[in-house]
Amino acid sequence: MVLAVLGALYFSLTSVGEKPAPVGVAVVPTSNAVAVEDKVQDKVQDKVQDKVQDKVQDKVQDKVHVAGQGIAVPSPKAVAAAPRVVEALPVAAAKKRAGNDVAGASNALPAAMGSKPQDGGKAQQKEAVPTMGRFADSGSLAIEKTDAVGTPRERAESEYRKALAAVNQGRIGDAVSGLRASLRQDVVHVAARQLLVKLLLEAQQRDDAMAILHEGVKVLPAQSNWAMTLARMQVERGDLPAAAQTLEHSMSAGAASADYQGFSGHVLYRLGRHREAADHYAIATRIAPADGRWWLGLGLAYDAEGRSNEARQALQQAKACGNLGPELTAVVEQRLR
């Protein structure tokens, strides 16, 4: 009877709000232009046969859009008039020149366009450096486009915001999937985990909610509210040892919370660990001395230890608080007779 009554001391599951973090998406610039400076041209010119030169000139197109930027390469006439720039090379020559090409790329492109490179031909540090593409089967240097991606944190935030939009539109299934995707990118994304737990509990998917909470408490023990929620669900399932372990894992985060200390005392009392229960109840009474629940718990724990005088004093203090409610007040009065 005492245990059933004591259960009324504790409160319902806590919902925790979330604050979306600002989104910042970093885009990795790409360039697909391969240009050659005059020095490199001089080194490789002797190795390029006349027939390759003729073939290259035939393949020059009037316009080529580089990396989707709309940068036009001159027509064959303009290419012929420009300093010696080779549009395509055999695979062997291209591979040999790859390292030197990148170093001079940012200034070679303006030269091919008919303009003078800045800083005396030195590469601009602030300009995007073109990257070497794959070598095509035809033997010429192929253009390769690389998709821009953000950091895992940024991808997680993007998925979280998509999930928020899905919730607002009533697409709960899509929101749950998006929140799971967010946590796969960033396991410590607090807002995504809180919202996911909330949606799962509302959908009565308690096993899934407990799994998400368990993972969250493991990686973020400072989230004492998660630990409290998980421990309550474990108590409801009769798994008191698991509840005690969960609470102990986040004890440092809940050290200043009367609710956390009092609930820990309740779990330990039910496990028969009365001395430890009394210690936690005593802490709770110091944090919130006007709350009769903790005095009642302390009195019951003292009584179980055979400390009758201390138990009576604690019960009297519980009654004096005047906020226990009819049922718990009746328990106190019965114990004081």
Image (cartoon, rainbow, N blue to C red):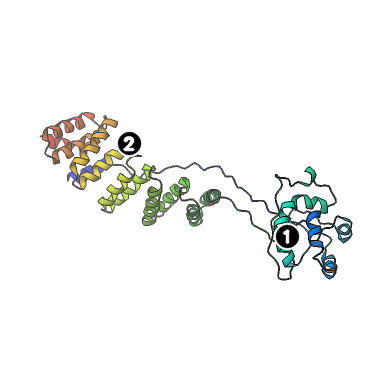
Callout 2 secondary element: loop
Inspect this view and state whether residue 229 appears. Answer: yes
Q: For residue 207, what is the image quadrant?
A: bottom left
Locate residue 166, reporting x and y percent: 53, 52
Residue of label 1: 97
Q: Which part of the image, by quadrant, shows the C terminus?
A: top left
**Do the CB atoms of the residues marked 2 and 1 lie less than 8 Å apart?**
no
Please name the residue shown 44% across and 51% down the image: 196
Relative to 233, 80 lies left or right: right
Three-letter residue code for mark 2: Ser
C-alpha span from label 2 to label 1? 67 Å
Mark 2 or 1, closer to the camera = 1
Give residue 167's mark: none
In the rendered view, tell whether residue 332 sits above or below residue 41: above
Q: Amino acid at mark 1?
A: Arg
Q: Secondary structure at mark 1?
A: helix
Please tell me which of labels 2 and 1 falls first in the chain: 1
The quadrant holding residue 289 is top left
Left or right of 11, for residue 307: left
Question: In the image, what residue occupies the spot 57% across and 44% down?
Answer: 23
- Look at the picture and state if 86 lies above or below 125: below
Report x, y in % for residue 116.
Answer: 83, 47
Residue 257 image label: 2
Q: Position of residue 229 (x, y in %)?
A: 35, 46
